[in-house]
Amino acid sequence: MMNRLYTLMWMVLGMQVSFAQVPLSLSDAIQKGLDNNYQIKISEANLDIAANNDSWAVAGRYPQINLTLNSQNGFNNSNNPASVLREQNSFNASIIPGLELNWTLFDGYRVKFTKQQLAQLKNLNEGNVQIAVENTIQRIILAYYQTLVQQEQLQVLLEVLDLSRDRIAYQEVKKDFGQATSFDLLQTQDAYLSDSTNYLVQENALENAFRNLNLAMGEDNLSIRYLLTDQIEVEDAYELDDLKQKMLASNKNLRNLQVNRELASINTKIQEAANYPSLSLRTGATYNLNISAGEQLFTFTPEPQTIPQVAAKSFNYFLNFSATYNLFDWGRRQKTIENAQMEEMIAQLNIEDQKRNLFSQLENTFATYNNQKRLLQLTDNLLENANQNLGIANERFKGGLINSFDYRSIQLSYINASQSRLNALLNLKNTEVELIRLIGGLVR
């Protein structure tokens, strides 16, 4: 039975080694995710649309020039015995090409404000791209660190598994010399089976972590294993006042709200433009070619007379100005302006509310970060003690000074200390990433 278990464990280890072929740094993982993320691509497409719209032509500064072509056709049939022209049947066909220019010369600075609005919409879409990039980077960093921790936890269990396997070999030798009982050997084998189970469970957790990392990077094949080349490092201490200043200057969500406030302010100016008169110019030229044909009957002619085909030509040019000023509309313009001013106030209130929430999140995250940093120091000391204790226990167990139960208890303490230290390190880095996101440091 133990030989089969040994074989199974080495097969698992062999699979792990065979998969870990592709080196992957954190920066490479982030670049993969940025290249493959669909939300970023959608945001960039929306930014391209906004950039195309950010022009004076879309805002309405320039005139419109239209080429026109009209065709007018008619048939006339008249019969009046009392008239000199008793009967007439005629057909008229005309073709009227023309060129027309329409230009709004003044509309209360609406064109100017519309151009500013289009520029701010471009800025808003740039902010949306940055938020999409920021979310992607944060997700990849957390998935990368999670995978590193799962990998380290697997390595700890492998180390413990090797110790358990050595204990079995040691107990088998002692039993052959009559210094150990079958009960002692069974206890050692039970510990090895428990460690083997934990190892396989942790191996599955590592595979899930790799899948989540591949998903965060936008990989189609979620089963790819990587050789993670970066390590989790603890950064220096942060200053809360410095973090607050950076957050006010660079937080992506706050900057988008500020752009929305500018859009609301511009919209108020656009609505106020309705209080001004508008002046427009319309000019152009038309050319008329009219051809008539048919027959007519007079009272003094016995037979109808044919109307010769006549091509009449005319050319017209026009230059017109029009001015419009709304004298009274039952208060509709004023209500629209007041509503725009209310929207502007709401946008400012959203900024103040977001600042309050961000300050609260920042202080809570900062306090959590400092607490987790102290917790990591404690778990470092705990792991160091547990490691030394395990080494001493291993020697004392081989010397027969402690039994298998005491040794197993010390071994489990080492496992718990290792996992506590890794979890503390992961929590610290996750909190640090959130801290950097709040101050807008993930995307520069």
Image (spheres, grey):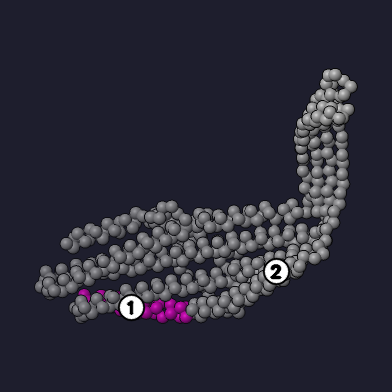
Q: Is mark 2 on a helix, strand or loop?
A: helix
Q: In this view, does 215 lie to the left or right of 238?
A: left
Of residue 265 and residue 198, the one placed in the foreground of this image is 265
For the stretch drawn in magenta, the main secondary structure is helix
Q: Distance between the residues labelled 2 and 1?
A: 66 Å
Give the side of residue 277 with respect to residue 194, left or right.
Answer: right
Query: Which span of residues is magenta-colored?
Result: 371-398
Disc marking residue 340: 2
Which is nearer the eye, 116 or 180?
A: 116
Which residue lies under the disc numbered 1? 386
Q: At 28% across and 68% down in the image, what residue appears?
A: 198
- Is residue 268 highlighted in magenta? no
Label 2 Cα crowd, 10 Å radius (few <14 / some 14-19 / many 20+): many
Point out residue 233 in the picture as x, y percentages from the top left corner.
47, 70
Q: Is 21 situated left or right of 349 in this image?
A: left
Give the quadrant of the C terminus.
bottom right
Amino acid type of disc 1? Ala
Q: Which residue in the rendered view is the most extreme toward the top?
A: 302
